[in-house]
Image (cartoon, rainbow, N blue to C red):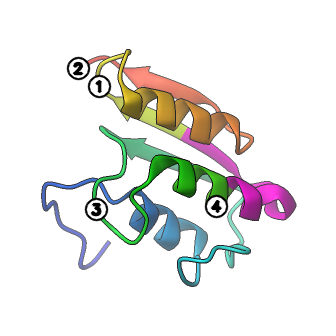
Amino acid sequence: MRGVCASGGTNLFGALEAALRIRGVAVDRFYTDADTVFLLSDGAPTVGAVVDPETLAEAISSANLGSRIALHGIYFGPANSPAAEFMQRLSGGNYGEFRRVAP
């Protein structure tokens, strides 16, 4: 993707915004033709328009009720971390599967 660069934070909402073509922070629907999204991450959200994991998970899951897009989470990091739990909850609440890749 053009204009994407590493900056030290984890902007999961920005990634989902681009993949699902979300328009604005108040997520009410997705504007994409995709039926599956793979979200690869090493952490919970720390930067971007939405950084609270609960708010992000609820907004995505609520908007996805009608779209039914499978959101698969692939997590790179330790098993017993809040980030792993968040990614697992996000995947499970959005018709997807969660996988952890050990560091």
Residue bearing mark 3: 47
Q: Earlier along the polypeptide chain: callout 1 or callout 4? A: 4
Residue bearing mark 4: 59
Q: Amino acid at mark 1?
A: Gly
Q: SS for tag 3? A: loop
- Looking at the picture, tell me which residue is in the foreground, 59 or 69: 59
Q: Earlier along the polypeptide chain: callout 4 or callout 3? A: 3
Q: Earlier along the polypeptide chain: callout 3 or callout 1? A: 3
Q: Amino acid at mark 3?
A: Val
Residue bearing mark 2: 103
- Looking at the picture, tell me which residue is in the foreground, 37 or 61: 61
- Looking at the picture, tell me which residue is in the foreground, 74 or 55: 55
Horizontal side of residue 34 vs 101, given as left or right: right
Residue 32 is situated, as x and y percent measured from the top left of the image, at 67, 74
How far apart in space, not on screen, are marks 1 and 4 (Cα)? 24 Å
Q: Amino acid at mark 2?
A: Pro
Mark linked to residue 97: none
Residue 45 is situated, as x and y percent measured from the top left of the image, at 36, 51
Residue at (59, 50) in percent of width and height: 57
Q: Amino acid at mark 4?
A: Ala
Residue at (47, 48) in percent of width and height: 53
Q: Is residue 46 above or below residue 1?
A: above
How far apart in space, not on screen, are marks 3 and 2 (Cα)? 23 Å
Magenta span contains residue 62: yes
Q: Earlier along the polypeptide chain: callout 2 or callout 4? A: 4
Residue bearing mark 1: 77
Residue at (74, 64) in percent of width and height: 63
In the rendered image, which quarter is residue 31 located in? bottom right
The reply to whether dot 2 and dot 1 touch (C-beta < 8 Å) is yes
Residue 38 is situated, as x and y percent measured from the top left of the image, at 53, 47
